[in-house]
C-alpha cells in the first residue's frame, strides 16, 4: 500500500492532467513548466555543485562531502528525450550521490525533436569517454538514469559493448524506458486511469520524435530489442503501476537469460518519476537507499575479486626442510 504522502502526490498530479489534456501545451510550454518546478528542488545539505563543460556540453559535478575522488556516477536525466535539464534533476542526483557516496557528473545532452537519435546517445558516449580521458577507470564508473535517461544508460552500455570499448562497473535504471513503441497492450492496461493514459500517449509521441525516420525497434533506441549479452551488473527499479512496468520486466528477463547479473526491484502502486519526489515520498527515499546498497555490493565484489587475484599471484614460499635426526 503506497504511503499517504504518495497518495497526496498522485491526487495532485491527477488533478493537473485534466487541464493539460484539454490545453495540449506546446513542448516549449512543458519545458518551461518543468524549469519553473525545478525552482523548488534543492540539493541535500552537504552536497556541493561545480559547473563543468564536457566536450562542449553544459554539465555539472554534484559532489557529496567525503565522497572518494576516484569513483564517479555518470547520470543521464529523464524527460522522454525531449524534456529535462540539469535543473530538473539536480536534487534527485544530489540525493542519490550522497547516499552512494559518489561524485556525480550530470550532462545536458541534446533533446529531440531538434536533435533526434543518435544525438543523445552520442553525447552520453562523449561524456563517458571524457571521464576516461580525465583518468577515471571504467571499473570506477557507474552509469545511471531515470525514465528516458535510464533507457539511454542501457543503450550506452550496448553501444560501448558493440564497439568493444571498456564497460563501466555497473548501470542503474530508475524506471528505464526500454521500449519506445509502448505497445497497444500497455495502453489498454492503463486506460482506466487518466494520469497513466495521458502519460502513455504523450510518451508515445515523444518516442516518435526521438526516433525520427528510424524504426522504434532500433536496438539503440529501444534497448529491449538489442542483444543483451556481456553487459555489466544492472540494477532496475520500477513500480507495478507505471506505464513502463511491463517493458522493464521484459528487459530484465531477457538480460538475465543472456547471463547478465540483474537486480530487479519492484514497488507497489507508485507513479512514474516517483524518485524525483524523494523529499516528500518515503518510498522514493527507500528506493534510493536500495541503490546505495547495490553500489556498495559492486565495490565489495571488486575488492574481493582483487583480493583473490592478489592471492593467486603471490609467490609461494618453499616449505622449510626438517633436519633428519641421526
Image (cartoon, helix red, strand yellow):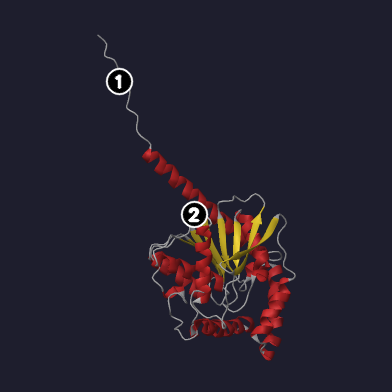
The extreme right residue here reads: 40
The extreme front residue here reads: 56
Figure disc tally: 2
* Residue 189: quarter of image: bottom right
State the mark number for residue 321. Answer: 1
Q: Assess disc 2: are there few (<14), some (14-19) or many (≥20) residues with their C-alpha within 10 Å of its C-alpha.
A: some
Task: Point out the image quarter for the C terminus.
Answer: top left
Residue 268 x/y as whole percent: 59, 69
Q: Decide: is 191 above or below 132.
A: below
Left or right of 260 in this view: 120:
right
Task: Point out the image quarter for the N terminus.
Answer: bottom right
**Residue shown at the point (69%, 84%) measured from the top left:** 29
Residue 90 x/y as whole percent: 66, 66
* Residue 258: quarter of image: bottom left
* Residue 46: quarter of image: bottom right
**Residue shown at the point (67%, 79%) measured from the top left:** 31
* Residue 207 visible, this angle: yes
* Residue 266 visible, this angle: no
Q: Which label's residue is closer to the chain start, 2 or 1?
A: 2
Q: Secondary structure at mark 1?
A: loop
Q: Nearer the viewer, mark 2 or mark 1?
A: 2
**Residue shown at the point (57%, 72%) measured from the top left:** 109
State the mark number for residue 137. Answer: 2
Q: Secondary structure at mark 2?
A: loop
Left or right of 24 in this view: 144:
left
Front residue (pair 210, 96): 210
Q: Assess disc 1: are there few (<14), some (14-19) or many (≥20) residues with their C-alpha within 10 Å of its C-alpha.
A: few
Residue 5 x/y as whole percent: 71, 68
The extreme left residue here reads: 326
Amino acid at each position: 500500500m503506497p504511503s499517504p504522502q504518495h497518495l497526496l502526490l498522485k491526487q495532485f498530479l491527477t488533478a493537473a492532467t485534466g487541464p493539460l489534456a484539454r490545453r495540449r501545451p506546446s513542448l516549449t510550454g512543458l519545458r518551461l513548466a518543468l524549469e519553473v518546478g525545478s525552482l523548488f528542488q534543492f540539493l541535500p545539505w552537504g552536497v556541493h555543485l561545480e559547473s563543468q563543460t564536457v566536450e562542449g556540453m553544459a554539465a555539472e559535478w554534484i559532489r557529496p562531502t567525503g565522497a572518494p575522488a576516484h569513483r564517479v556516477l555518470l547520470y543521464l536525466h529523464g524527460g522522454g528525450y525531449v524534456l529535462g535539464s540539469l535543473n530538473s534533476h539536480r536534487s534527485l542526483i544530489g540525493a542519490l550521490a550522497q547516499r552512494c557516496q559518489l561524485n556525480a557528473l550530470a550532462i545536458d545532452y541534446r533533446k529531440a525533436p531538434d536533435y533526434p537519435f543518435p544525438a543523445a546517445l552520442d553525447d552520453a558516449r562523449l561524456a563517458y569517454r571524457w571521464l576516461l580521458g580525465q583518468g577515471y577507470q571504467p571499473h570506477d564508473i557507474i552509469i545511471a538514469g531515470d525514465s528516458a535517461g535510464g533507457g539511454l544508460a542501457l543503450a550506452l552500455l550496448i553501444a560501448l559493448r558493440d564497439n568493444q570499448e571498456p564497460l563501466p562497473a555497473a548501470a542503474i535504471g530508475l524506471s528505464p524506458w526500454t521500449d519506445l513503441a509502448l505497445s497497444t497492450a500497455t495502453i489498454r492496461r492503463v486506460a482506466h486511469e487518466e494520469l497513466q493514459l495521458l502519460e502513455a500517449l504523450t510518451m508515445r509521441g515523444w518516442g516518435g520524435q526521438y526516433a525520427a525516420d528510424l524504426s522504434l525497434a532500433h536496438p539503440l533506441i529501444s534497448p529491449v530489442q538489442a542483444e543483451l549479452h556481456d553487459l555489466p551488473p544492472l540494477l532496475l527499479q520500477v513500480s507495478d503501476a507505471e506505464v513502463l512496468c511491463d517493458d522493464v520486466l521484459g528487459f530484465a528477463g531477457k538480460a538475465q537469460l543472456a547471463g547478465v547479473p540483474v537486480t530487479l526491484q519492484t514497488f507497489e502502486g507508485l507513479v512514474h518519476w516517483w524518485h524525483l519526489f524523494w523529499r516528500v515520498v518515503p518510498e522514493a527515499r527507500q528506493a534510493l537507499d536500495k541503490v546505495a546498497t547495490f553500489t556498495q555490493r559492486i565495490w565489495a565484489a571488486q575488492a574481493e575479486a582483487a583480493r583473490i587475484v592478489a592471492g593467486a599471484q603471490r609467490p609461494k614460499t618453499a616449505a622449510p626442510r626438517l633436519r633428519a635426526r641421526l
